[in-house]
Image (cartoon, rainbow, N blue to C red):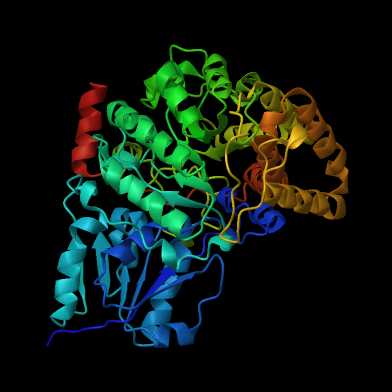
C-alpha cells in the first residue's frame, strides 16, 4: 500500500560545544543562536514529495523532545564528525520511541558502520538516491541502505533549498552552494573522497532562484557560499559572477557573501575584481603550514612558490578579509614549527586563524597511508573514543613522527602567540587599513525581514542601523563581561574609522569573533597543557593501532629493499 502524507521531522544534530566553529559567545553578542543554518537538511527537505509535511529542529538553536519524535512518521538526521555523538543520541531516542530514523550526510558516508543502529542509511549525495528512497518508503520498506554513485550526481538538478523552514534570526548567516568538488589532492582532505576532483557547478538560473527565494522571504545580510573551493572551476565561476553582480545591483545589494577558496585566488586579478563587485567580503583559505617541504609532502603545492603574505595582501586589496586554517603534526615537521607559524600569521596579518592538530579523517589518502604504516589509532572515526571531537583537542589520532609532546608544546605556543589580545587586535588594525571595501552610498539598506532601516552617512557611511545595533550589543557585552578588552576594541574601532571607515563592518566582525576565539584559545591551551603533563608523567598511553593488512606489510618490506 502506498504511504501518503508521511510526516517528516528533520533533526540537525548539535555540534560539540567545545568547538572552534560554534562561536557561542559571538552569537550571543549579536543576538543569534548558532553561526550557520543547516543547508544540507533543508536541501533534503526540498527533495521530498510536496505532500509530505516537514518540520525542522536544529538542536543548536532549540531542544529536541520525545514529543517531537512522537509526532513524526519518519525522522531524518545526520551531519559531520563533530555532530556524531548528538546524531547517535537522536537515533537512540527514535529507537526508544519506536520511530524509524534515516541518517545521511558526510559522516555516515565516510563511516557507515558507526551508524548501524539507524533504520535507514543514505550514503553519498542525496539528489541521486532520494527518489529511490521515497519509492521504497511508499512501498512499505522501513530499513535499508541507499548509496549514491560517487561523483556522478548532477547538481544542475538540485532543487531550491527549503529556506522557509529556517528562523533566520537564529543564525549569523545562511548558506548556498554553487559547486561541489575540488581539483587539488591534499592528502588529509576528505572533500575529494566525498565529492571528487572535478568540480560540478549549478547553473546561473539555479543560483539566482535560490537568492530570489531568500529575498522573497525577507532575508538580508550575510550569505555564505559553502563550496569547499569556490574557484575550483574558475571558468564556470567567471561566467556566473557577472550575472550575480547584475542581480545584486538590481536588488540593491541585499546580500554580502563569504566563501572558501584556495590561495591561488590571489593570482587572478579579474576574478578578485568580480568577487569584489559581487560584494564578497570574506574568504577562508587553507594555508596549513609555512614550511614548503611540508606543503609539498601534504600535496598542497598550490601554496608553494609564492609569498603567502603578498598573496593574502592582494586579497585584502580587493576588499576581502582572509580567515585561514593552519595545521600542526605533519610527518615532515623536522623541528619546532611554532615560531615560523606565528611569523607567518603576523606577516600575512590574518586575525582569525583556525589552528588545529592534524586529524586523520576517515577514508582519506592520509588515513589509508597510516593504516599501511601501522600508525592509525583504533577508533579514529568514533566520537566516543575521544573526549572532545574537534581537531583542536582531538587531533593526532595516529602515531606521530615527531614526539607528541613537542607537537603539543608547539601548538600551545602558537595559540598563545596569535590570540594574545595585543597581537590579535594589532592584526585587525592592520587589516582594517588594507581592506579596500566598495562604497555603499548608492545601495539600499539591508534588513532582516522587518522593513528597510536607512543607511547611515558620514563616518559610518554604508553601515546599516541594524549593523549599528549589533555593534552596540557587542560593545555592551565587552564592557560588562570583558572590560579588560574594551580598550582594545575602542582603539581598533577608532583606528579603522580614522584611516579606512569603509572597512568598519569587516573590522567589527573580527572584533566580535574574538569574544569566542580568545576564551576558546585559552581553554584549548589549558586542555593541551594538562595532556602534556600526563605525557611527561607517563600517565598517557597510545591507543591500540589499526592492524595493517598482509599486503601492506609485504609492500613495506619490498619498499625497504
Tell me how many marks there are: 0
Q: Quadrant of the N terminus?
A: bottom left
Does residue 12 appear to the left or right of 449 in the view shown? left
Give whichever of 492, 330 is nearer the camera. Answer: 492
Q: Quadrant of the C terminus?
A: top left
Residue sitting at 22 percent across and 47 percent down?
156
Residue sitting at 66 percent across and 41 percent down?
509
Give whichever of 481, 155 is nearer the camera. Answer: 155
Q: Is residue 32 above or below residue 514?
A: below
Residue sitting at 26 percent across and 35 percent down?
197
Residue 459 point in image, percent of width and height: 77, 33
Residue 525 point in image, percent of width and height: 69, 43
Give whichever of 96, 53 is nearer the camera. Answer: 53
Does residue 460 appear to the left or right of 1 in the view shown? right
Residue 8 point in image, percent of width and height: 34, 77
Q: Is residue 19 above or below residue 295?
A: below
Residue 199 point in image, percent of width and height: 27, 36
Residue 80 can be seen, yes or no: no
Does residue 256 appear to the left or right of 340 in the view shown? left
Does residue 444 appear to the left or right of 294 in the view shown? right
Residue sitting at 28 percent across and 26 percent down?
235
Residue 142 can be seen, yes or no: yes
Amino acid at each position: 500500500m502506498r504511504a501518503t502524507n508521511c510526516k517528516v521531522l528533520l533533526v540537525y544534530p548539535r555540534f560539540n560545544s567545545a568547538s572552534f566553529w560554534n562561536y557561542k559567545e559571538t552569537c550571543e553578542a549579536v543576538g543569534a543562536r548558532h553561526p550557520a543554518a543547516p543547508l544540507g537538511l533543508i536541501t533534503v527537505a526540498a527533495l521530498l514529495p510536496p505532500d509530505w509535511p516537514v518540520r525542522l529542529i536544529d538542536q543548536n538553536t532549540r531542544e529536541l523532545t520525545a514529543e517531537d519524535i512522537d509526532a513524526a512518521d519518519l525522522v531524518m538526521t545526520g551531519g559531520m564528525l563533530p555532530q556524531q555523538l548528538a546524531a547517535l543520541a537522536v537515533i537512540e531516542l527514535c529507537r526508544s520511541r519506536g520511530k524509524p530514523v534515516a541518517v545521511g550526510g558526510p559522516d555516515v558516508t565516510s563511516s557507515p558502520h558507526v551508524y548501524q543502529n539507524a533504520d535507514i542509511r543514505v550514503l553519498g549525495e542525496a539528489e541521486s538516491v532520494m527518489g529511490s528512497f521515497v519509492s521504497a518508503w511508499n512501498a512499505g520498506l522501513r530499513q535499508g541502505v541507499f548509496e549514491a554513485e560517487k561523483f556522478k550526481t548532477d547538481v544542475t538538478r538540485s532543487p531550491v533549498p527549503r529556506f522557509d523552514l529556517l528562523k533566520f534570526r537564529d543564525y549569523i548567516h545562511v548558506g548556498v552552494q554553487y559547486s561541489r568538488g575540488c581539483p587539488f589532492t591534499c592528502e588529509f582532505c576528505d572533500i575529494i573522497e566525498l565529492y571528487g576532483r572535478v568540480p560540478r557547478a549549478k547553473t546561473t538560473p539555479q543560483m539566482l532562484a535560490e537568492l530570489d527565494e531568500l529575498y522573497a522571504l525577507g532575508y538580508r545580510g550575510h550569505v555564505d557560499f559553502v563550496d569547499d573551493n569556490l574557484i575550483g572551476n574558475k571558468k564556470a565561476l567567471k561566467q556566473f559572477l557577472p550575472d550575480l553582480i547584475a542581480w545584486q545591483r538590481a536588488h540593491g545589494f541585499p546580500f554580502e557573501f563569504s566563501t572558501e577558496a584556495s590561495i591561488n585566488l590571489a593570482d587572478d586579478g579579474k576574478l578578485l575584481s568580480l568577487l569584489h563587485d559581487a560584494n564578497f567580503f570574506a574568504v577562508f583559505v587553507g594555508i596549513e603550514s609555512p614550511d614548503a617541504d611540508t606543503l609539498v609532502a601534504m600535496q598542497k603545492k598550490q601554496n608553494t612558490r609564492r609569498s603567502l603574505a603578498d598573496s593574502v595582501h592582494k586579497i585584502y586589496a580587493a576588499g576581502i578579509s582572509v580567515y585561514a586554517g593552519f595545521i600542526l603534526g605533519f610527518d615532515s615537521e623536522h623541528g619546532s614549527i611554532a615560531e615560523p607559524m606565528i611569523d607567518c600569521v603576523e606577516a600575512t596579518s590574518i586575525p582569525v586563524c583556525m589552528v588545529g592538530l592534524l586529524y586523520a579523517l576517515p577514508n582519506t589518502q592520509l588515513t589509508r597511508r597510516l593504516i599501511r604504516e601501522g600508525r592509525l589509532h583504533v577508533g579514529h572515526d568514533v566520537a566516543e573514543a575521544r573526549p572532545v571531537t574537534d581537531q583542536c583537542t582531538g587531533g593526532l589520532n595516529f602515531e606521530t613522527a615527531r614526539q607528541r609532546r613537542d607537537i603539543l608544546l608547539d601548538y600551545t605556543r602558537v595559540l598563545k602567540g596569535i590570540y594574545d589580545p595585543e597581537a590579535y587586535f594589532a592584526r585587525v588594525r592592520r587589516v582594517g587599513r588594507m581592506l579596500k571595501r566598495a562604497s555603499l552610498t548608492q545601495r539600499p539598506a539591508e534588513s532582516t525581514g522587518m522593513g528597510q532601516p536607512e543607511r547611515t552617512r558620514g563616518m559610518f557611511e554604508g553601515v546599516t542601523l541594524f549593523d549599528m545595533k549589533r555593534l552596540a550589543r557587542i560593545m555592551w557585552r565587552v564592557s560588562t563581561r570583558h572590560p579588560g578588552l574594551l580598550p582594545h576594541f575602542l582603539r581598533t574601532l577608532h583606528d579603522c574609522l580614522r584611516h579606512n571607515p569603509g572597512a568598519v563592518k569587516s573590522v567589527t566582525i573580527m572584533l566580535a569573533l574574538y569574544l569566542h576565539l580568545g576564551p576558546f584559545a585559552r581553554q584549548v591551551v589549558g586542555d593541551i597543557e594538562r595532556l602534556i603533563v600526563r605525557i611527561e608523567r607517563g600517565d598517557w598511553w597510545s591507543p591500540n593501532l589499526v592492524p595493517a593488512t598482509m599486503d601492506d606489510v609485504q609492500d613495506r618490506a619490498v619498499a625497504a629493499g
